[in-house]
Image (cartoon, rainbow, N blue to C red):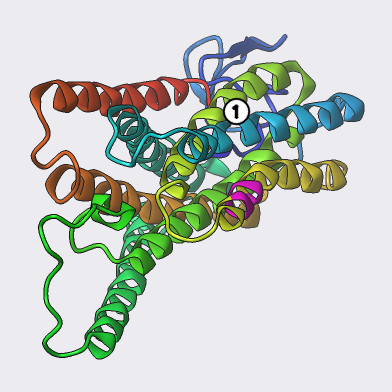
């Protein structure tokens, strides 16, 4: 999900992308992702003031919302982890695979509709005065994409080398009658170490923008706080569900999976706590703030785009349990994938 710069001088407390306000002097402002566009009574564009907006902040309300976000995030991320742990369903069970496909759609939409789009809005803010390089957002996204590829490629080479060294010559292949293990249900050619790394990278990309989500939620004006809070509440459930469905697949002890889930659950509340601490100083219209948040959004988009398309979408459909699935399983999982994309894209209208 993208985060939002503060409003301009003609627009106080406006957060929703569909919110429009009209001031006493006839200036009408429409906002999307916190980037305002204002016109006067004659339809002429009015430049926004780039000073720090003056807003009312109910600190007690924000502290209460912090704990609600914490609980909601935990519910989202631990639901698939606990389902996998305490049921007899294997990783190729229809319900488990469909859950992962819904999560895949969530991640892909988050990368493109939320992070990339909102990064462009940040870099297009009038308070920056324009960038010398118009494709800045795309370039930063490619940097995140390429760095993720390099990390996974190196890990893949190291993992394969270690396997070749530890495998004794003349070792026979497993017999067809051998009982299938959990490893056999993972995508083909995906070592457990690589799956763990991919999940860790995915969580890192989510953590970057989750901190920003918490920060921007808190510094939003009271007039638009509840609207933004409701959207972020749903966002945390869906994104936590997506991450949890991948954490459930990785090898290792249950405690390790719990730690990964806890880290996600705490990240957005941590961002909110930071925001509460800087309420009296934060200026979302400051050029350095716009560049920093825009850069993190675009870079995170690159990370999640790689993980979503390559590690999740491609692996499951071309090298995993859906490569030769039956008609019913294929249709159900395709609908789950599309549902994840649609749900998160619809949320992009408000945040």
Looking at the picture, how far across and down is residue 38, in whole percent? 55, 22
Looking at the picture, how far across and down is residue 329, in whole percent? 18, 26
Up the image or down, 90 lies above or below 174; here it is: above
The residue tagged 1 is 232
Q: Secondary structure at mark 1?
A: helix
The range drawn in magenta is 258-263
- Residue closest to the eye, 63 or 178: 178
Chief SS of the magenta region: helix
**Residue drawn 74% across and 47% down?**
270
Q: Quadrant of residue 231?
A: top right
Left or right of 324, for residue 240: right
Left or right of 251, for residue 266: right
Question: Is 218 inside the magenta-drawn segment?
Answer: no
Q: Is residue 142 visible?
A: yes
**Residue drawn 64% across and 36% down?**
74
Up the image or down, 272 lies above or below 67; here it is: below
Question: Is 262 inside the magenta-drawn segment?
Answer: yes
**Residue drawn 65% across and 28% down?**
72
**Residue drawn 66% across and 48% down?**
262
Looking at the picture, how far across and down is residue 29, in whole percent? 57, 18
Looking at the picture, how far across and down is residue 49, in whole percent? 67, 36
Q: Quadrant of residue 109?
A: top left
């Amino acid at each position: 999900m993208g985060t939002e710069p503060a409003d301009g001088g003609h627009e106080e407390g406006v957060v929703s992308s569909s919110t429009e306000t009209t001031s006493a002097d006839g200036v009408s402002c429409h906002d999307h992702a916190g980037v305002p566009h204002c016109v006067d009574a004659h339809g002429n564009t009015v430049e926004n003031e780039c000073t720090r907006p003056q807003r009312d902040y109910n600190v007690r309300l924000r502290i209460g919302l912090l704990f609600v976000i914490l609980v909601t995030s935990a519910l989202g991320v631990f639901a698939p982890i606990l389902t996998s742990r305490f049921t007899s369903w294997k990783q190729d069970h229809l319900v488990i695979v469909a859950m992962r496909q819904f999560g895949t759609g969530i991640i892909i939409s988050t990368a493109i509709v939320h992070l990339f789009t909102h990064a462009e809005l940040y870099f297009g803010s009038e308070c920056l005065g324009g960038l010398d390089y118009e494709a800045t957002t795309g370039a930063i996204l490619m940097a995140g994409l390429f760095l993720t590829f390099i990390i996974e490629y190196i890990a893949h080479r190291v993992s394969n080398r270690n396997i070749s060294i530890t495998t004794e010559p003349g070792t026979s292949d497993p017999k067809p009658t051998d009982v299938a293990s959990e490893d056999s249900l993972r995508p083909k050619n995906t070592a457990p170490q690589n799956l763990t790394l991919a999940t860790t990278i995915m969580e890192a990309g989510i953590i970057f923008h989750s901190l920003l989500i918490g920060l921007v939620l808190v510094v939003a004006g009271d007039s638009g706080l509840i609207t933004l809070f409701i959207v972020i509440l749903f966002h945390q459930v869906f994104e936590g569900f997506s991450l949890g469905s991948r954490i459930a697949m990785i090898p290792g002890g249950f405690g390790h999976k719990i730690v990964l889930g806890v880290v996600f659950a705490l990240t957005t509340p941590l961002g909110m706590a930071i925001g509460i601490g800087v309420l009296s100083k934060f200026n979302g219209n400051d050029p350095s703030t716009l560049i920093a948040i825009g850069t993190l959004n675009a870079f995170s988009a690159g990370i999640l785009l790689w993980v979503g398309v390559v590690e999740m979408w491609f692996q499951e459909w071309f090298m995993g349990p859906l490569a030769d699935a039956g008609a019913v399983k294929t249709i159900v999982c395709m609908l789950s994938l599309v549902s994840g994309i649609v749900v998160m894209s619809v949320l992009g209208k408000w945040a």
